């Protein structure tokens, strides 16, 4: 009789243990989805910057399947954020500047803009311009980073040809000197190509990964002027699919923006073409197709 009771007790414990294991498995964090799952947004220079209303921009990008937009400057940011939120998409970034060593090292309105952006997740995409050095640049970026941190915001250094920080590798160097958790880098494909960095892109991606907040892409040839290096996705000689595959394999899951500067033709059609190419890249990366 005692043996039977003991066996029943053991069976009950085993059953309870099994239930606990099942519950734990269900509550455990699911692994990241495979494939190209990054949010894909468009730069405002691809949707008639300043001409359609903000609501019209949001409606068009929503219709075409974009996750949102990257704006420029600090004007009307709360209005922009709300208009996109109302459409179920979002503002991912706003393009701003600093000039270390200048009398006004950044737009005085930027600090107020940070307060307005609290809780929005909008990244401050910061160019570092002018004749300066790493010490002065780091001091200004730290000042902005500390102000941004008070409102839960991140800063991504935006490498730009001809500026003090022109490449991703230079941005990595500065970010390490700034030493703030809310300051990272971005990889801007067209600027890397213009700088002649194409052969080193896999190495650049690997070096950037611990600090990588943002990426921008576009169709492109291997070299030439901006008309060759900034084209709709799916156009040009450069292997954008291979670039995205390398990013994906490195583990980057952050936002990717579509650079549209000075691209000729109907902007809505260009955006539609680029979205079609993006979906093709998604399909091929998920299926591991070449």
Image (tube, rainbow, N blue to C red):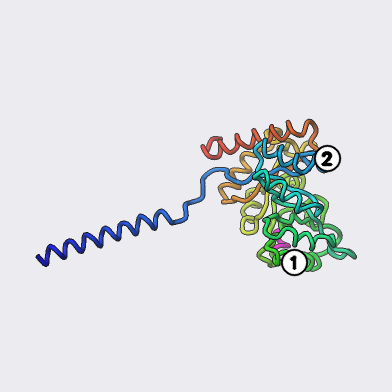
Q: Using a 10 Å C-alpha cutoff, classify the residue at mark 2 as few (fewer than 14 neighbours), some (14 to 19) or many (20 or more).
A: few
- Across and down, in percent, residue 106 comes to 83, 61
In percent of the image, x 78 and y 59: which residue is there?
113
Say if residue 159 shows up in the picture. no
Within the magenta stretch, is there residue 289?
no
> What span is colored magenta in the figure?
171-175
- Across and down, in percent, residue 35 comes to 54, 43
In percent of the image, x 48 and y 51: which residue is there?
31
Q: Nearer the viewer, mark 1 or mark 2?
A: 2
Considering the image in quadrants, where does the C terminus appear? Answer: top right
How much space separates mark 1 and mark 2, taking CA atoms?
A: 32 Å
Reading the image, the residue beneath label 1 is 147
Predominant SS along the magenta part: helix
In percent of the image, x 58 and y 38: which residue is there?
282
Reading the image, the residue beneath label 2 is 51
Say if residue 235 shows up in the picture. yes
- Across and down, in percent, residue 88 comes to 64, 45
Q: Between 221 and 278, which is closer to the camera in this rendering?
A: 278
Q: Between 101 and 254, which is closer to the camera in this rendering?
A: 254
């Amino acid at each position: 009789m005692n043996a039977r009771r003991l066996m029943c007790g053991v069976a009950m414990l085993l059953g309870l243990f099994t239930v606990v294991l099942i519950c734990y498995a269900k509550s455990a964090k699911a692994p990241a989805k495979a494939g190209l799952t990054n949010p894909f947004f468009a730069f405002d220079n691809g949707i008639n910057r300043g001409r359609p209303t903000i609501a019209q921009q949001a409606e068009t990008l929503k219709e075409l399947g974009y996750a949102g937009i990257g704006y420029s400057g600090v004007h009307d940011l709360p209005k922009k954020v709300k208009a996109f939120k109302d459409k179920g998409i979002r503002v991912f970034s706003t393009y701003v500047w600093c000039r270390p060593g200048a009398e006004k090292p950044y737009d005085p309105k930027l600090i107020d803009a940070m307060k307005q952006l609290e809780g929005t997740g909008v990244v401050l995409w910061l160019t570092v311009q002018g004749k300066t050095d790493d010490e002065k640049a780091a001091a200004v970026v730290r000042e902005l980073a500390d102000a941004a941190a008070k409102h839960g915001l991140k800063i991504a250094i935006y490498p730009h040809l001809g500026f003090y920080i022109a490449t991703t590798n230079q941005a990595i160097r500065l970010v390490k000197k700034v030493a703030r958790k809310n300051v990272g880098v971005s990889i801007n494909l067209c600027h890397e190509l213009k700088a002649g960095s194409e052969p080193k892109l896999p190495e650049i991606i690997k070096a950037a990964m611990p600090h990588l907040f943002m990426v921008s892409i576009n169709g492109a040839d291997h070299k030439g002027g901006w008309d060759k290096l900034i084209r709709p996705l799916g156009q040009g000689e450069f292997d954008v699919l291979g670039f995205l595959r390398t990013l994906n394999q490195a583990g980057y899951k952050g936002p990717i923006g579509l650079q549209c500067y000075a691209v000729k033709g109907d902007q809505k059609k260009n955006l539609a073409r680029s979205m079609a190419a993006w979906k093709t890249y998604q399909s091929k990366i998920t299926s591991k197709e070449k």
